[in-house]
Amino acid sequence: MSDKLRRYWDNLAGKKQFTIKLLPELILPCLPESPRILDYGCGYGRTLLQLRGLGFKRLAGTDISTAMLELATKALPQAEFVECNNFLTPWPDASFDLILVIGVLTSVVDTQDQHRLIKEVLRLLRPGGYIYLSDFLLNNDPRNIERYCKYQPEYGAYGIFKLPDGGLLRHHDINYICSLLEKFEQKELKEMQHTTMNGHNSNGFAYVGRKSAIYP
């Protein structure tokens, strides 16, 4: 994970609002009493604040951005926050009942890095625990097709593109997402429309998967 990526998100702290919505109805039926929940890529704590409002108290967050984590800690001092380094966190194996990964894959554009991220999520989840992952899918409008094609030769994957501010992002094929999450038992997969940070409409999805009770 490059320092450039870290600096990019540090620079956006307090300037951009994240927009992908958590759908509590997809996760509430999965959870035990008093679950321990991690928001992986928590940013400034937006989703954790929503969970706190729903009555959840055992909350934690991790992010690559120090500036984002400072905002999250101010917003929700009751939660536990740590900085993520090369997709790894200091928590022991099987620490969480639910891990949220919301709008994270879009900024982790390298396929191998995405697999490292999911491997860490699997490590942190208790057997029988759940992942909730929501992100952006490929779009078929001329604007997006043009930028997907423009950057595919440079980055080796269709769906990667650069923003005017230098940010590098990725939209995904739903079949690729299912392959990335193949070690989970799929419980929910809902395609929908998301709004991007810059106010555009985009195809998106929300996924709920269960880690095997006998994993690994």
Image (cartoon, helix red, strand yellow):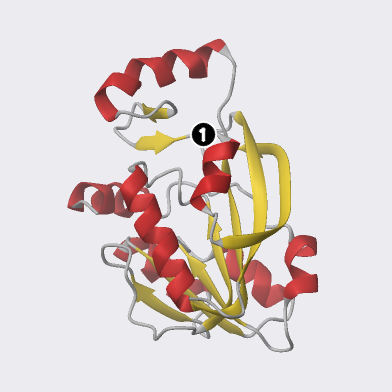
Can you give x and y, in whole percent of width and height, for residue 46 in the image? 57, 62
Mark 1 nearby-residue class (10 Å; few <14, some 14–19, many ≥20): few
- Residue 20 vertical position relative to residue 72 in the rendered view, above or below: above
Relative to 201, say whether 8 is above or below: below
Q: Is residue 52 above or below residue 206?
A: below
| Towards the viewer: 7 or 119 | 119
**Which amino acid, mark 1?**
Asn
Q: Residue farthest to the left?
A: 3
Q: Residue at position x 36%, y 41% from top? A: 109
Q: Residue 126 location in percent, x, y?
A: 55, 81
Name the residue located 65 percent from the left edge and 44 percent from the top edge: 205
| Residue in view at x 21 percent, y 51 percent | 2
- 209 relative position to 196: left or right: right
Spot occupied by residue 135 in the image (x, y as percentages of width and height): 56, 45
Left or right of 206? Residue 78 is left
Depth order, front residue of 37/118: 118
**Image point 72% across, 78% down: which residue?**
31
- Residue 196 visible in rendering: no
Quadrant position of the N terminus in the picture:
bottom left
| Nearest to the observer: residue 75 or residue 96 | 96
Expressed as whole percent of the image width and height from the top left, the position of residue 176 reads 52, 40
Q: Tell which of 88 and 13 is nearer to you.
A: 88
Q: Is residue 13 left or right of residue 125?
A: left
Name the element at disc 1.
Answer: loop
Q: Mark 1 sits on what residue?
A: 198
Number of numbered discs overlaid on the protein picture: 1
Position of residue 74 in the picture relative to residue 31 (left or right): left
